[in-house]
């Protein structure tokens, strides 16, 4: 059995996916995840989720407009409440549909990534980045110490700037490993700056703070700056929340700078503040 449309007919795919969601047909989803159609299924579901997000933003704007009309006397409070109740009912149905769609999309996205080889590509990219970061750190340490670099050091540093890797999908064609390392360091500093400020705020004068206590403020600060597509892409890898992953990496960044240290306690993981002035400096000079 095959799907009743071609891999380039996205309109037909959209109709089929909607029917599959209503029918809860396991066989339909097996076909949608087949190698011949899984990339199309992934593409169409992403478009569906984008439309849901746009519609949600539109409804939010409409509610604000309706509230303003009440204040201006253009509609009554009763009319506003009636419209709000109708909108809430529609929003509940949409939320249920979106939840169901995202559940299926996690599996579809994973299958699409495997087919494209995205996981292998990402693992290799992470390996190259880690190696480049280590070389860059070694170069900084040698130069800071005023030691004469060896011929091997210089050759390694030259390779760092000369070696190019393919860009990310939709991004630049190729980029040097050195530039890749620089961009990564900038992003890490940005997230590290946010985390440093949160640690100072939550810890106050205490010498340590629980990791769990940082999470609410971290989510409020970081979640809005992460693109929904980026979060969905990470979720498709089956590695959990991108927000939590960013926290893990930011903690590692602060540890490598010698600003904090992770420790275990009966209540869970804690962060010991090792260099408060350093945290203040990284956070932009802001003390709690």
Image (cartoon, helix red, strand yellow):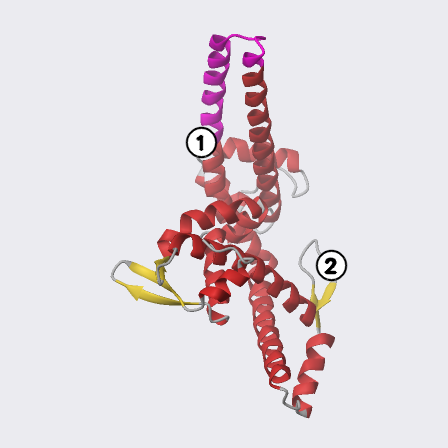
Residue 29, percent from left and from top: 49, 42
Tell me: 212 left or right of 257.
left
Question: Of the residues tagged 1 and 2, which is closer to the observer?
Answer: 2
Q: Which mark is residue 124?
A: none
Q: Which residue, given by chain and number where applicable, does mark 2 sit on?
A: 172
What is the chief secondary structure element of the magenta stretch?
Answer: helix
**Residues drawn in magenta:** 69-95
Write down the residue under mark 1.
96
Q: Nearer the viewer, residue 276 or 233?
A: 276
Q: Is residue 38 above or below residue 101?
A: below
Q: Nearer the viewer, residue 192 or 35?
A: 192
Q: Is residue 236 magenta?
A: no
- Quadrant of residue 23 within the rendered picture: top left
Q: Mark 1: few, some, or many residues within 10 Å (few <14, many ≥20)? A: few
SS at circle 2:
loop
Separation of disc 1 and disc 2 at Cα?
38 Å
SS assignment at label 1: helix
In the depicted structure, whether residue 263 falls above or below residue 5: below
Between 199 and 263, the residue placed more toward the observer is 199
At 48% from the left edge and 16% from the top edge, which residue is drawn? 86
Neighbour tally class for label 2: few under 14, some 14-19, many 20 plus, Cα within 10 Å: few
Q: Is residue 65 above or below residue 221?
A: above
Counting from the top left corner in percent of width and height, residue 109 is at 54, 49
Residue 82 among those drawn in magenta: yes
């Amino acid at each position: 059995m095959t799907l009743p449309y071609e891999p380039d007919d996205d309109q037909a795919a959209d109709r089929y996916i909607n029917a599959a969601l209503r029918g809860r047909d396991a066989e339909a989803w097996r076909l949608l995840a087949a190698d011949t159609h899984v990339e199309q299924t992934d593409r169409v579901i992403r478009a569906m989720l984008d439309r849901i997000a746009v519609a949600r933003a539109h409804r939010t704007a409409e509610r604000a407009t309706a509230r303003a009309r009440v204040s201006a006397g253009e509609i009554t409070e009763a009319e506003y409440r009636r419209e709000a109740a109708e909108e809430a009912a529609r929003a509940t149905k949409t939320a249920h549909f979106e939840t169901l769609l995202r559940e299926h999309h996690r599996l579809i996205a994973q299958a699409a990534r495997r087919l494209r080889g995205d996981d292998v590509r990402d693992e290799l990219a992470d390996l190259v980045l880690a190696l480049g970061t280590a070389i860059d750190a070694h170069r900084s340490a040698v130069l800071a110490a005023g030691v004469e670099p060896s011929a091997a050091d210089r050759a390694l540093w030259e390779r760092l700037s000369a070696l190019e890797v393919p860009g990310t999908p939709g991004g630049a064609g190729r980029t040097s490993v050195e530039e890749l390392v620089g961009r990564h360091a900038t992003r890490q500093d940005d997230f590290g700056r946010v985390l440093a400020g949160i640690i100072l705020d939550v810890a106050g004068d205490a010498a340590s703070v629980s990791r769990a206590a940082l999470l609410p403020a971290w989510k409020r600060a970081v979640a809005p700056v992460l693109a929904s597509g980026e979060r969905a892409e990470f979720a498709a890898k089956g590695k959990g929340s991108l927000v939590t992953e960013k926290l893990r990496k930011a903690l590692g960044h602060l540890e490598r700078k010698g600003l904090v240290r992770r420790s275990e306690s009966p209540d869970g993981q804690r962060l010991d503040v090792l260099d408060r002035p350093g945290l203040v400096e990284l956070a932009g000079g802001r003390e709690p």
